[in-house]
Image (cartoon, grey):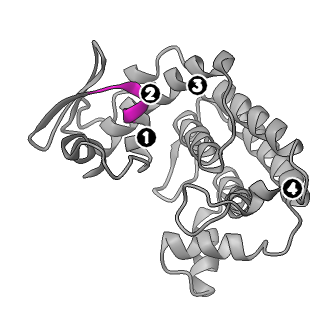
Amino acid sequence: MSDASGPDERHLDGFDPYDALDAEASGLEAWLDGLADDDPVWDQPSRCEGWTVRDVLAHLLAVEDYHHACLDGRVQQYIETGMAAGHTSLDEFNQAGVDAHAGTPPHELAAAWAAADAETRGGFRERDGGEIDSSVGPYPARWQAFHVATELATHADDMGRPVGPEEAADRLAWRAAFSRFALSEKDGDATVEVAAGGTHVVTGGTDVIVDDATLVEGLVGRLPDDADPTVRSALSAH
């Protein structure tokens, strides 16, 4: 259980967010490099409703502007610029980012994303132990790096990036650990502990044990429609 001082950082012990970021970027970049501009995969639906695989890549490129704003201490300016353009919700910000890259060939999107992401990853490493700017104000760079790695992993899955057996176990381990941390961050009253079979979650009158894969999918809003309502409530309703 976390306390009033903040989320339960014990869950992150033994995991390096910068290594996770590097691994996610490397895996995604290698996959993208193998796709030609006329590959039919670009027009296939992703797990993000209304977005194709190409749209998700455009989103990843666009969101690098936010990551750079975090590193440069200008998040408020970034938000104000978007609001001045008429974007009043996160969905509108995100769609505007995708629309801004409409018509750009996929290989150009991939190259631009890879360059911007490398700058982001280097910037977070340099600020380890300190804070960066964010939409909620000053925030530990190390924690934010985990959030960024999680976003990258989630969208790689959304796009259908294959994950080989040689990386699957380590990938799931750090994502599950960060999901436990993130749940304690979202709900300071929750009990979140490693247990046999996964993670024991007690929150809002719900008491469940969730396996690692379900925990990860639940914390990023990717549970299937037929997911156990009790599990969905424990992981999503905060």
Residue located beneath label 2 in the image: 176
Q: How crowded is mark 1: few (under 14 residues within 10 Å), some or many (20 or more)?
A: some
**Residue 171: which numbered mark, if any?**
3
Residue located beneath label 1 in the image: 217
For badge 2, the amino acid type reads Ala
Does the segment drawn in magenta span residue 51? no
Residue located beneath label 4 in the image: 112
Q: Can you tell which of label 1 and label 4 is closer to the viewer?
A: 1
Q: How crowded is mark 4: few (under 14 residues within 10 Å), some or many (20 or more)?
A: some
Of the residues under marks 3 and 1, which one precedes in the sequence? 3
Visible in this render: residue 79?
no
Q: Which segment is the magenta one?
A: 210-215
Q: Residue at x 55, y 76 (%)?
A: 92
Is the residue under label 4 in contact with that under label 1 (CB below 8 Å)?
A: no
The secondary element bearing badge 3 is classed as helix
> Can you tell which quarter of the image residue 157 is in?
top right
Q: Residue at x 83, y 46 (%)?
A: 114
Q: Using the numbered discs, state the Cα–Cα distance from disc 2 to disc 1 in whole angstroms.
A: 9 Å
49 in relation to 137, above or below: below
Q: Nearer the viewer, residue 201 or 37?
A: 37
Q: Using the numbered discs, state the Cα–Cα distance from disc 4 to disc 2 in whole angstroms.
A: 30 Å
Residue 109 position in % (x across, y down)? 84, 59
The secondary element bearing badge 1 is classed as helix
Residue 4 in the figure: left or right of residue 76: left
Q: Residue at x 55, y 59 (%)?
A: 48
Q: Which of 191 and 69 is in front in this view?
A: 191
> Can you tell which quarter of the image residue 165 is in?
top right
